[in-house]
Image (cartoon, grey):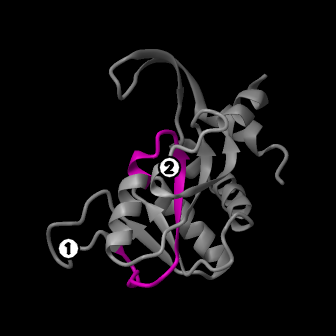
């Protein structure tokens, strides 16, 4: 385990100031996950921690648009497992694919996501990939921001395996 990872991510990504959240609410604190994803050293550390969380029988690493794509690419390079890039919705031109990469039918896809809070995007991707014939049972995420002890994806039978939790990030700040 990388003992300083939570502190390093928190120090880089937790911003203070005036922010408008997606909900429209105002906040004086914001967590900018893209800052660690754009930092090659931090991204490599997160990806290395994810390697140990992958199910052994993973065929494909499904990086969710947008934040999961760079992480899945890095984990793919560390493991030699092919990456798959999963869009929020199928493109409406060319191949009209939802998932770019190898065919998913009959394959075990481990989803890769940056942050899971309510799991909306992961839930949608899971359903769509399953409809395409994929076996999807696990999502490995960099940060699980859902309430402690809760699995926001239990309703779709998905196990969440985080590198870090919100509690670990909060503790690193203290």
Q: Is residue 126 left or right of residue 110?
A: left
Residue 17: image location, x then y, percent:
51, 16
User: Does 103 appear in magenta?
Assistant: yes
User: Does 29 appear in magenta?
Assistant: no
For label 2, the crowd category at 10 Å Cα-Cα, with few meaning under 14, some 14 to 19 and many 20 or more, is: many
Residue 128 location, quadrant: bottom left
Residue 55: image location, x then y, percent:
66, 71
Q: Nearer the viewer, residue 35 or 94?
A: 94
Q: Is residue 15 left or right of residue 118?
A: right
Question: Which residue sits at x=20%, y=73%?
Answer: 96
Helix, strand or loop at label 1? It is loop
Above-or-below relation of 28 to 114? above
Marked residue nearer the N-terminal end (1 or 2): 1
Q: Is residue 126 left or right of residue 167?
A: left
Above-or-below relation of 95 to 85? below
Task: Tell me the quarter of the image containing the C terminus.
Answer: top right
* Residue identifier under label 2: 153
Residue 1: image location, x then y, percent:
84, 54
- Disc assigned to residue 96: 1
Q: Which residues are magenta?
A: 100-122
Helix, strand or loop at label 2? It is loop
Q: Nearer the viewer, mark 1 or mark 2?
A: 2
Q: Nearer the viewer, residue 125 or 152?
A: 152
For label 1, the crowd category at 10 Å Cα-Cα, with few meaning under 14, some 14 to 19 and many 20 or more, is: few
């Amino acid at each position: 385990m990388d003992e300083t990872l939570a502190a390093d991510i928190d120090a880089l990504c937790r911003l203070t100031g005036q922010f408008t959240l997606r909900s429209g609410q105002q906040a004086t604190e914001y967590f900018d996950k893209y800052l660690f994803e754009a930092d090659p050293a931090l991204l490599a550390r997160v990806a290395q921690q994810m390697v140990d969380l992958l199910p052994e029988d993973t065929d494909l690493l499904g990086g969710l648009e947008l934040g999961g794509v760079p992480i899945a690419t890095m984990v793919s390079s560390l493991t030699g497992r092919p990456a798959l890039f999963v869009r929020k919705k199928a493109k409406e031109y060319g191949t009209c694919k939802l998932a770019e990469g190898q065919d998913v039918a009959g394959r075990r896809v481990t989803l890769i996501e940056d942050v899971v809070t309510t799991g909306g995007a992961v839930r949608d991707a899971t359903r769509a990939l399953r409809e395409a014939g994929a076996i999807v049972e696990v999502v490995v995420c960099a940060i699980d921001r859902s309430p402690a002890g809760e699995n926001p994806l239990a309703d779709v039978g998905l196990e969440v395996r985080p590198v870090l939790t919100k509690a670990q990030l909060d503790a690193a700040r203290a």
